[in-house]
Amino acid sequence: MKYLAIVLTLAIGGFAVAQDIRQTIPLPLPMTMGGSGGVTGAVALSSTVGALPACNAAIKGQIYFVTDAHLPALGAIIAGGGAVNALVFCNGTNWIRG
């Protein structure tokens, strides 16, 4: 298992004291964002391609999970009407497969 190691160094009266406080902490760090606490990790908003908000500079960087992508290649402008689940992001102009 990967772990996070933290080493503290304190200067006390001219002497440096190091204390290794290793703990087994799973990486990546688990996190829960909102909701009822039943989901661990960040959860993207879900939508169909047609229901995505207009991609513009105001929402640049926003991420959605779409359920009806049509054979999307990575980095391509997303099109709806298919049956592929995909993460997409707004680049300021278009929704792009991420």
Image (cartoon, rainbow, N blue to C red):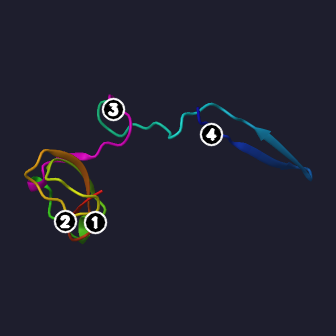
The amino acid beneath tag 3 is Val
Q: Are marks 1 and 4 in contact (CB under 8 Å)?
A: no
Q: Earlier in the sequence, mark 3 or mark 2?
A: 3
Q: Earlier in the sequence, mark 4 or mark 2?
A: 4
Is 9 situated above or below 94?
Answer: above
User: Quadrant location of the C terminus?
Assistant: bottom left
The residue where tag 4 is placed is 4
Categorize mark 1 by other alpha carbons within 10 Å: few (<14), some (14-19), many (20+): some
Q: Is residue 30 above or below residue 8?
A: above
Start-end of magenta stretch:
37-50
Q: Is residue 18 left or right of residue 55?
A: right
Q: Which disc, if any, is residue 55?
A: 2
Q: What amino acid is found at the position of numbered circle 1 in the picture? A: Lys
Give the image location of residue 47, x and y in percent.
Answer: 15, 48
Task: Look at the numbered discs 4 and 2 and tell me whether their residues touch, using CB distance below 8 Å.
Answer: no
Q: Quadrant of residue 8?
A: top right
Q: Position of residue 91 (x, y in %)?
A: 27, 67
Q: Along the line of sight, which residue is nearer the eye, 48 or 56?
A: 48
Residue at (31% x, 42% y) in the render: 43
- The kind of residue on which mark 2 rests is Cys
Crowdedness near tag 3: few (<14), some (14–19) or many (≥20) residues, C-alpha within 10 Å? few
Q: Quadrant of the N terminus?
A: top right
Instruction: Depth check: give the residue in front, 85 or 26.
Output: 85
Q: Residue 15, how many percent across, how many down?
A: 91, 49
